[in-house]
Image (cartoon, rainbow, N blue to C red):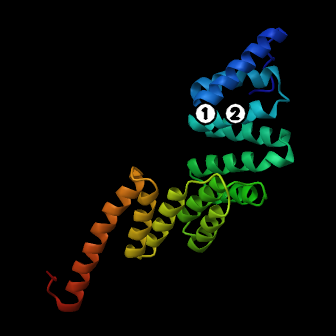
Amino acid sequence: MSSNERAPELTPAQAEELRARAKKSWDDVGGSAETAELFRVLVRVDPGDGFAWFCWGDSLRAIGRFREAEEALLTSRDLAPKSQLFTVDARLGMLLAKSGSPAEAEKWFRLATSSSECPGWAWVLRAVNLIRMESIKLARECLRAAKLRGDVDLEEVMLNEALIDRYLGNYEDAARGAEGALDIDANYQPARDLLDQLRGAAEARVYATGLMETGVPRE
């Protein structure tokens, strides 16, 4: 929002109607273009509403307007109570990870997970970002921490542990992890896809190793 833009002049009733509609959009569909348009005006009406800045910033993140999203989320952070900083920090981490800046994202994820209030899902997001950075040991530690907290999908944790094992070439362990995720949720498609990839990798290893050792592929 440009500092030169004048705040719209709404009556108290209009402002409350806008706030109610914006909150309903956030609750119903979360970050979206619809939600972004409603909160775009609401933060001009009430620039001291940290939650409105958060919802606007996260909606901008969801539709790919990363620069504006970062500015809005940083404003939200300035207005947020200390107990809720981890929520904003995690969103900033998600934003920077999505925009292709994993090292910058790690700074915000590290801040988020430094809070004792931080739930497991933020630890998982940090682990996913660390896997992209090939910081495997720290990613494992984050996944272990996620298991100790609430608000986390265990199948997602197990999938990411399996992805680490795949990275390390431990295909059998990775397959067991993917199967464990499917034991929790039989319809978890990312785990099914990983299992399919791992079968091909295991077969390729046997074939290539056979060529290397004997010069003749094994049956």
Please state, as top left, top right, bottom left or bottom right, where the C terminus lies in the image.
bottom left
Residue 158 visible in rendering: yes
What residue is shown at x 45% (from left), y 75% (from top)?
168
Q: Residue furthest bottom?
A: 214
**For residue 31, which numbered disc appears in the image?**
1
**Which residue bears the numbered disc 2?**
55
Q: Residues within 10 Å of mark 1 (few under 14, many from 20)?
A: many
What residue is shown at x 65% (from left), y 56% (from top)?
120
Q: How many marks?
A: 2
Q: Secondary structure at mark 1?
A: loop
Q: Residues within 10 Å of mark 2 (few under 14, many from 20)?
A: many
Q: Position of residue 218 (x, y in %)?
A: 16, 83
Looking at the image, is 100 positioned above or below residue 67?
A: below
Looking at the image, is 31 positioned above or below residue 70?
A: above
Looking at the image, is 215 positioned above or below residue 10?
A: below
Q: Amino acid at mark 2?
A: Cys
Left or right side of 10 for 193? left
Q: Position of residue 105 (x, y in %)?
A: 65, 55
What residue is shown at x 69% (from left), y 56% (from top)?
109
Q: Are marks 1 and 2 in contact (CB under 8 Å)?
A: yes
Looking at the image, is 56 positioned above or below residue 102?
A: above
**187 or 201, which is in the foreground?**
187
Q: Secondary structure at mark 2?
A: helix
Q: Position of residue 91 (x, y in %)?
A: 67, 46
Quarter occupied by residue 193: bottom left
Left or right side of 180 for 25? right
What residue is shown at x 54% (from left), y 61% (from top)?
157
Q: Earlier in the sequence, mark 1 or mark 2?
A: 1
